[in-house]
Image (cartoon, grey):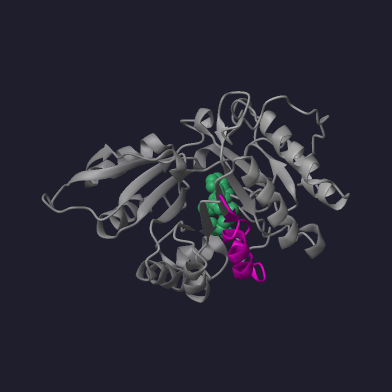
Amino acid sequence: MTKNTPEIVHEKQEKPSVVAPANGRLVDLFARSISYLRVSLTDQCNLRCVYCTPREIDEKLACGELLSYEELLRVISLAVGLGIRKVRLTGGEPLVRKNVISFIDRLAAIPDLQDIRLTTNGVMLKTYGEALFAAGIRKLNISLDTLKKERFARITGRDLFDQVWEGIEWVQSLGFSPVKLNMVVLRGVNDDELLDFAGLALERDLQVRFIEFMPIGESTIWGKEKYVSSDEIRQRISVLGEMEEAYSHHMDGPARIYRFTKIYGAEGETPKGTVGFISPISHKFCEKCNRLRLTSEGRLRSCLLSDRETDIKAILRGGGSDEDIRQALVHTILNKPRSHTLLDSEQAGCQGRMSRIGG
Ligand code: SAM
């Protein structure tokens, strides 16, 4: 076990009496319906963002440590059989995993899996955009923390801003929708670009989402002084115009979405996009959380911010039956914490690495 590997809590797996009721919904102990699985396809990434992927610790999982595509498809099919309806592929950078498109083709063939989405840093969208579209993916989240080329290179360790921007324009031209841009806001690093990002949502059909920085993993440059709350962000971008909360569908996740109803200095113009706020720290959304995660190491995790995991790889590779896998899924869901405890104490935080958990 490496320093960064969270301790796995193996709990006795008792057969729960009612978990997947006849209506095909997976419900946890707090009456949350769990329908969304996030899968980290790989811990590897082609960027080295200062707050996410450690530059100094360059260890990655060996190939055999990742779940194979067959193993992933088996777990996901069984999860869908229990009530999962939406899958997001993430990582690490999901598009760096070999043969990812043929995997997505096979994923899309799982009956009852209604929605497959992808989170990417955008570096390979020019290469894979058309193939992703052909595989049936329409909804993309693209991470972008700056619109400045030099700053992009400083934050990510790679001089690839132009390539990412071209990728964003390319997927929009192909018809992906919605395209969501995710910006992690870091005080003193990129918070001087809040208006530029909000301005993008006025000019383009994009959902620009501001994410609160979270203390995750040893690699993070986390410090309370770098954290900017959603309320502050909203207040700062309100100089651009008046906003009202837009309807956001439960399946669209925890973001609170706003639309500009009046643009100062350009009254009468209609904004093309929307802005969103993801506030895991300032406005916990745990009571609405419908997520389960499968880490790149093959562990089930019921909360991004809790290091409690179930080792599904051991079950798969130990000859576990489909019923054993179903029970592990159910067990993980039954142990989903009511709410995360991040920042409840000075020591609080999660040690798991974002790229392995799947951001
Ligand atoms: N490579 C893909 C990408 O860049 O979108 C997927 C993986 S990345 C880990 C997923 C998201 O997690 C990114 O938007 C990244 O900015 C975000 N992230 C990573 N560390 C974070 C942290 N400490 N706090 C908030 N968001 C974080």
Residue, x 53% and y 55% (percent of image)? 116
Residue farthest toward the left in the current orientation of the protein:
268
In magenta segment, residue 99: yes
In the image, residue 119 lies at what x, y percent?
A: 53, 56
Residue occupying the point 55% across, 46% down: 85
Up the image or down, 99 lies above or below 318; here it is: below
Seen as rendered, the residue at the extreme bottom is 127
Q: Position of residue 265 (x, y in %)?
A: 13, 51
**Viewer-closest of 242 and 115:** 115
Give the left or right position of residue 250, taking residue 10 as reference. left
Location of residue 152 in the rendering, given as x and y in whole percent from the top left corner: 48, 64
Magenta span includes 69: no
Task: Specify the quadrant of the image occupied by residue 71.
Answer: bottom right
**Residue drawn at (46%, 39%) of the image:** 254
Q: Is residue 50 visible?
A: no
- Determine the residue positioned at 40% across, 72% down: 170
Compared across the picture, whether 91 is left or right of 310 comes to left
Range covered by the magenta-colored residues: 89-112
Labels in figure, total: 0
**Residue 248 is at least partly visible in this image:** yes
Image position of 178 with respect to 81: above or below: below
Q: Nearer the viewer, residue 155 or 108?
A: 108
Horizontal relation, residue 19 to residue 226: left or right: right
